[in-house]
Image: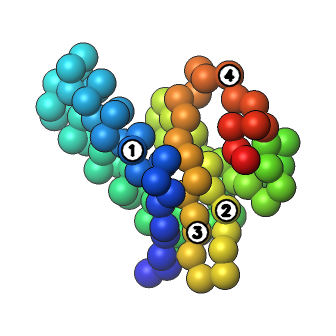
Amino acid sequence: MAKFVVSRSASAQPEAIYEFTDARMGNYQAEAYLEGFNHIFNLLADFPRIGVHADEFRVGLRRHRYQSHYIFYTEEADHIFIRDIFHVSQNLRPSMFD
């Protein structure tokens, strides 16, 4: 299995999403959504090119949609680097990816 590394910024997002989901939709849904992130991270590591190019934000950046969130990542020599996670409704700007 291929590897993935998660940035400090991206690693904080699933916990915040978990808390939000737990408060509004319950523990079962929060657990399922959190487990889904882990599944998608592994999928992206195995098939890094399934994400679409997001060069408009940063050259070499890719994004993959997981339910209501975009996962932004780059392909590195021996792993993928999960750079950030944003809700699809967020107004994204290139400066967010410096």
Residue 57's image quarter?
A: top right
Residue 12 in sight here? yes
Circle 3 or circle 1, nearest the eye: 1
Contact between marks 2 and 3 (CB within 8 A): the answer is yes
Q: Is residue 35 above or below residue 86?
A: below
50 left or right, relative to 14:
right
Residue 94 image position (x, y, % from top left): 78, 37
- Badge nearest the viewer, 1 or 2: 1
Residue at (39, 44) in percent of width and height: 12
Task: From the viewer's side, name the closer residue of 16 and 1.
Answer: 16
> Which numbered disc flags the more N-terminal residue, 4 or 2?
2
In space, the residues marked 2 and 3 are separated at their CA atoms by 6 Å
Q: Nearer the viewer, mark 4 or mark 1?
A: 1
Circle 2 crowding by C-alpha within 10 Å: few under 14, some 14–19, many from 20: many
| Left or right: 26, with 50 as reference point | left
Mark 1: secondary structure = helix
Residue picked out by circle 3? 80
Q: Give the mark nearest the N terminus, 1 or 2.
A: 1
Q: Residues within 10 Å of mark 3 (few under 14, many from 20)?
A: many
Task: Indicate whether 77 appears above or below 83.
Answer: below
The picture quadrant where one finds residue 33 is: top left
Three-letter residue code for mark 1: Ala
Check disc 4: other Cα within 10 Å, few if <14, some if 14-19, many if 20+.
few
Residue extending farthest to the left is 27
Q: Is residue 27 left or right of residue 40?
A: left
Where residue 61 sits: x, y (%)? Answer: 73, 55
